[in-house]
Image (spheres, helix red, strand yellow):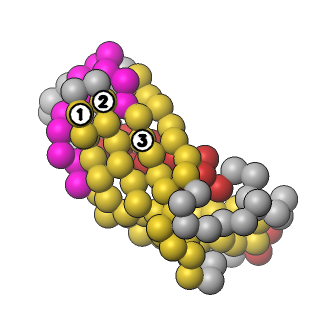
Amino acid sequence: MEIAPGLAGSATCVVSDSDTAIAHRSGDVPVLSTPRLVALCEEAACAALEGCLAPDTTSVGTHVEIDHIAPSPPGATVLARAEVERVEGRKVNFMVSASDGKGAVASGRIVRALVHRESFLSKLSV
């Protein structure tokens, strides 16, 4: 399957206490944290690429731009959606959004780069 504009994926999270700003130490309120929201949007972008990558290829996040516009309390179901906006060589640009039962939670853009898994991992300095 070819990676092309319009290709989409989604991911869902039922907000738990471990997903909150308090748990992620990114604030002091018991609502979905921005770091967890970003992870959910990244998960949706990865889901969009499922079945499109060669076995020795993966994608890595390179840029995230998210507007977190509404809070989601524990128990809320948050749905993130990512859609390929354009492909520039090895870079895949996604439009992302998230919503819960009350409406929009976030919108933004994510860029992921396609990399050869082994080559990428060989750059680790452990």
Looking at the picture, which amino acid does disc 3 mark?
Answer: Ala
The answer to whether mark 1 and mark 3 are in CB contact below 8 A is no
- Pinpoint residue 123: horizontal percent, then vertical percent: 68, 75
Tell me the element at label 2. Answer: strand
Looking at the picture, which amino acid does disc 1 mark?
Answer: Gly
Residue receiving disc 1: 103
- Nearer to me, 5 or 33: 5
Residue at x 31% of width, y 36% of height: 99
The stretch drawn in magenta includes residue 119 = no
Q: Which mark is residue 80?
A: 3
Residue at x 55% of width, y 52% of height: 8
How packed mark 2 is, by other alpha carbons closer than 10 Å (few <14, some 14-19, many 20 or more), is many
Which secondary structure is most common in the magenta stretch? loop
Query: Where is residue 70, by image quadrant?
Result: top left
The answer to whether mark 1 and mark 2 are in CB contact below 8 A is yes
Residue 38 visible here: yes
For residue 49, side relative to residue 5 (left or right): right
Residue receiving disc 2: 100
Residue at x 66% of width, y 66% of height: 3
How packed mark 1 is, by other alpha carbons closer than 10 Å (few <14, some 14-19, many 20 or more), is few
Q: Quadrant of the N terminus?
A: bottom right
Mark 1 or 3, closer to the camera: 1
- Pinpoint residue 13: horizontal percent, then vertical percent: 44, 29
Give the residues in magenta.
67-78
- Nearer to me, 106 or 84: 84
- Nearer to me, 5 or 16: 5
- Pinpoint residue 107: horizontal percent, then vertical percent: 29, 53
Q: Earlier in the sequence, mark 1 or mark 3?
A: 3
